[in-house]
Amino acid sequence: GENVEQHPSTLSVQEGDSAVIKCTYSDSASNYFPWYKQELGKGPQLIIDIRSNVGEKKDQRIAVTLNKTAKHFSLHITETQPEDSAVYFCAASSPGGANNLFFGTGTRLTVIP
Amino acid sequence: DSGVTQTPKHLITATGQRVTLRCSPRSGDLSVYWYQQSLDQGLQFLIQYYNGEERAKGNILERFSAQQFPDLHSELNLSSLELGDSALYFCASSVGQAPYNSPLHFGNGTRLTVT
């Protein structure tokens, strides 16, 4: 089955700096890659997703890039704010087979004011 | 607020007991997924239902079972509980059958503590 690896496990940045979280996946058939933000005491919240037919997607301060050849995708947060502090999860989904998302192990992002 | 409702929020029970976790999906969503989140293992897929039928199964233990009812709410039953079953259990819902076409939206989870 699909295996998703996520790095780093923890990340601290100064407010206003950029943050980058990287994930790799193993199944070349995977075609959907969402990112979730989980705040303390809450469930994961979908913040952005990308499908395999595009290489980059942007939504205000958040962007995701996908490299299908290398089988990796990244989350970029620019102009970080304290409210961006949370745990971020990447995930991958492949057609056929298991009809679900395979998650990375999460990155705890801390934005220092 | 994702629109997915999970009850109860917290559950404390003893080893060997049986509990039921409940999930109400977002209005209009036909799929319900169950995930387990442990401290050391991230989010692990348990099972998916679509419009009342089981669609996909992950690493769900035989002691665990689930169902989706005609009104589309779902229940996850955990029996013969062990200390290692302590975790956050999340329900997610989506409109369609596959994540590619139908993003998952998560509830706020049920925290199960087995003592």
Image: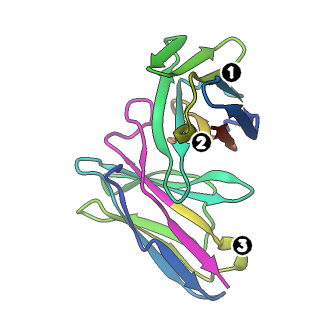
Q: Chain of mark 3?
A: B
**Badge 1, how many Cα within 10 Å: few under 14, some, many 20+?**
some
The x, y position of residue A17, in whole percent, is 65, 23
Q: Which residue lies under the disc numbered 2?
A: A85
The answer to whether residue A87 is seen in the rendering is yes
Q: Is residue A29 above or below residue B106?
A: above
B75 vs B112, left or right, is: left
Q: Which residue lies under the disc numbered 3?
A: B84
Q: For the residue marked with disc 3, what is the amino acid?
A: Gly
Q: Chain of mark 2?
A: A
Q: For the residue marked with disc 1, what is the amino acid?
A: His
The x, y position of residue B112, in whole percent, is 57, 74
The x, y position of residue A6, in whole percent, is 72, 35
| Boundaries of the magenta span | B90-115
Q: Chain of mark 1?
A: A
Q: Residue furthest front?
A: A113
What residue is shown at x 73% (from left), y 36% (from top)? A11
Q: Nearer the viewer, residue B112 or A109?
A: A109
Question: Helix or strand or loop: what does disc 2 sit on?
Answer: loop
Question: Does residue B96 show up magenta in the picture?
Answer: yes
Q: Which residue lies under the disc numbered 1?
A: A72
Question: Helix or strand or loop: what does disc 3 sit on?
Answer: helix
What residue is shown at x 50% (from left), y 47% (from top)? A44
Q: Are marks 2 and 1 on the same chain?
A: yes
Q: Compare marks 2 and 1 and give the one earlier in the sequence.
A: 1
Question: Helix or strand or loop: what does disc 1 sit on?
Answer: strand
**Cα gap from disc 2 to disc 3, whole angstroms:** 29 Å
What residue is shown at x 48% (from left), y 27% (from top)? A49
Q: Nearer the viewer, residue B21 or A60?
A: A60
**Cα gap from disc 2 to disc 1, whole angstroms:** 23 Å
Question: Does residue B27 show up magenta in the picture?
Answer: no
